Amino acid sequence: MIDFLVLGAGGAVPTPTHSPAAYWVVVDGHGILLDPGPGALVRLVRSPHGPDSLDQLTTVLLTHLHLDHCADLAPLLFALHSPLLASTEPLYLIGPEGLATYLRRLSELYGSWIEPYQRRLVVRELAPGDAMDPAAPDRGLKCGPDTTAGDEPQGASVTAFAAAHPEDRFGRYCLGFQFRDAAGHCAVFSGDSEPCPALAEASRGADLLVVECSTPDEWAMAGHMTPTRVAELCRQAQPQRVVLTHQYPPAAELDLPDLVGSGYAGPVIAARDGTLVRIGADRGGSGRIGTTPPGDRSGGQP
């Protein structure tokens, strides 16, 4: 079973309903904080679908190192410096090439302030085609463009693919991710990307595609998706359900499901902060997908 909780459905410009990027993905019971942008930690522990404490956080996964996707890394490490947190389990920080350099530069700025009080940090950089076990993130799985179908990871896995988004500070590429549970259900996260073959291939036949839809068509820019681009991707890949995220204010004001649906017959949801999509939740394992509305632990809106 895979839960995909949208903690931040917006881009770098926050609104009351669309905060910067942040997602909580649970694969067969193993939680992953994906792209912790500004304010992600508060929204994570506030959500009724997230962990109760940062002590329960074991894995952070990043598509790229732009601030709207990684700005809460430093606050997370600063929080772990506190002796109030009790966990002694390793914390896995996993992302693209350049992550180790980014963390080293944070350390140059903040020194011991961002050294966890009693948790060991395990940093792993992924290249396109690399895969990991969500239950043991430091363990690589055999996968990649040169493997055959029989070599694909068995059981639950998270596999990186190359996204088409500009990166000129820390590494050569940005990533998207394909999440699979042990029953074979598949959820794909585009990261930030314009249309590209790797995204189309990863999304082909997926149970769920969580894809950015940053701007209206008339504001189209390199490295990002628009409703028309998303519709074309969906026509090619035919995912079973689509969730639109990373919406900047002009896009969020549109009827995005209607615009995308004009070129794609499947169900489309425009995410808001707090949207939760679950696949594989039925006992028969047929991949039934459900959606719950936003909320917080107090029962109000986030």
Image: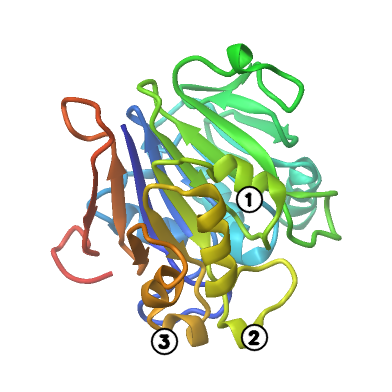
Q: Counting other residues with Cα less than 10 Å from the Cα at mark 1, is it few (<14), some (14-19), or many (20 or more)?
A: some
**Mark toward the start of the polypeptide (1 vs 2):** 1
Amino acid type indicated by mark 3: Glu
- What colour scheme was applied to this rendering of the protein? rainbow
| Residue 160: quarter of image | top right
Q: Are marks 3 and 2 in contact (CB under 8 Å)?
A: no
Q: Is residue 52 visible?
A: no
Q: Secondary structure at mark 3?
A: loop
* Residue where numbered disc 3 is placed: 253
- Horizontally, residue 86 falls left or right of residue 47, namely right
Q: CA distance from mark 3 to mark 2?
A: 14 Å
| Front label number (1 vs 2) | 2
Number of the label disc, if any, that sits on residue 219: 2
Relative placement, left or right, of 161 versus 42 is right
Locate residue 180: give its quadrant: top left
Q: x, y percentage for residue 45?
A: 33, 53
Q: Residue at x 68, y 45 (%)?
A: 198
Q: Is residue 184 visible?
A: yes
